[in-house]
Amino acid sequence: MLNNAWKKFIHVSKTNWIIRTIVAILIIILFTISLIRFLSIPKVESQNLNIRKNPSPYAKVIGNVERGQSLHVIKKNKNTGWWKIKINNQKGWVASWLINKEKYNAKNSDNIAETTIVLDPGHGGSDAGTLSAEGDKMEKVYTLKTALKVYHELQNLNANVLLTRDSDKYVPLANRAYLSYASKANLFISFHFNSSNGMYNANGYQVFKYHKNADTFANIIDKKFENLPMENRKVDFGNYYVLRNNTQPAVLLEMGFMDNTHDFKLIKSDAYQQKIASDVRMAVQEYFKD
């Protein structure tokens, strides 16, 4: 009789120990999940951040987030970088790329910082583009060098700058246009250098556009380029894939002729590439001026 009672006592104790262990493990798991969620809540490091009604730099500002505040993120758009957040019972959208910009302050900044700009260095990889008169220099090298200089100029404005390629690799034209569409780019700028197909007598730069939504920026950037030491061939219609199949405001820049001795001397120089970059930056600033 005592032996049975003792066995029953041991069985109950063992069962209780198992239950307590399971409960303890569940508590630890729940605590860990809560801690991970808490640590993953982004905290604003910029001085001030706009909350907009819609995910666009043109949308109405409905509030602000101050430095040190934590954001409850409802939804993230990985393509555009805009996050839907809730703070103090208010829902809206913030430009996520600005959250960690310590010097950024929405109260004294223009809306360039909340824009997305796609830069498209033409050609790349197996696609060399056009060649210099001697046939030993490839367009793809200089489109990338120039676009990277523009990239750094626009990064300094805190814009969300995307590159269709950042190295010597082949990128299909469809992918370039799709990046512009998916990211809801506010501007798409494609960089190229021209060729006269062996005639060697054409020179100058030119801005091309296809859709009407690019008219304004095309005219602005063409005006900014007037300080370049090269003939202005004026804004023109360009039936190019990355323009034609682009829903966003898009321009294609031909910044000189690879097979023209005068032009190529400029094209390969860092100074000329930087001049283009500075002019593009000023054109962007004027285009997005409030």
Image (tube, rainbow, N blue to C red):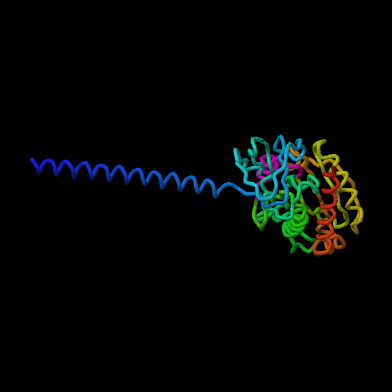
Instruction: Give the left or right position of residue 61, taking residue 30 as reference.
Output: right
The image position of residue 142, as x and y in percent, is 75, 59
Location of residue 144 by image quarter: bottom right
Q: Magenta includes 219?
A: no
Residue numbers of the magenta segment: 171-187
Q: Is residue 290 above or below residue 137?
A: above
| Closer-to-camera residue (268/99) | 99
Q: From where the camera sits, is residue 130 visible?
A: no
Location of residue 264 by image quarter: bottom right
The image position of residue 65, as x and y in percent, is 70, 44
> Which residue is at a point 46% across and 48% down the rendered structure image?
32
> Which residue is at a point 74% across and 52% down the rendered structure image?
104
| Closer-to-camera residue (280/124) | 280
The image position of residue 44, as x and y in percent, is 66, 49
Q: From where the camera sits, is residue 76 visible?
A: yes
Where, quadrant-wise, is the C terminus in this rendering?
top right
Instruction: Give the left or right position of residue 185, taking residue 10 as reference.
Output: right
| Closer-to-camera residue (96/241) | 96
Residue found at the far front of this picture: 2
Instruction: Give the left or right position of residue 274, taking residue 32 as reference.
Output: right
Q: Is residue 37 above or below residue 91?
A: below
Where, quadrant-wise, is the N terminus in this rendering?
top left
Q: How many marks?
A: 0
Location of residue 155 by image quarter: bottom right
| Closer-to-camera residue (200/105) | 105
The image position of residue 140, as x and y in percent, is 72, 57
Q: Magenta includes 186?
A: yes
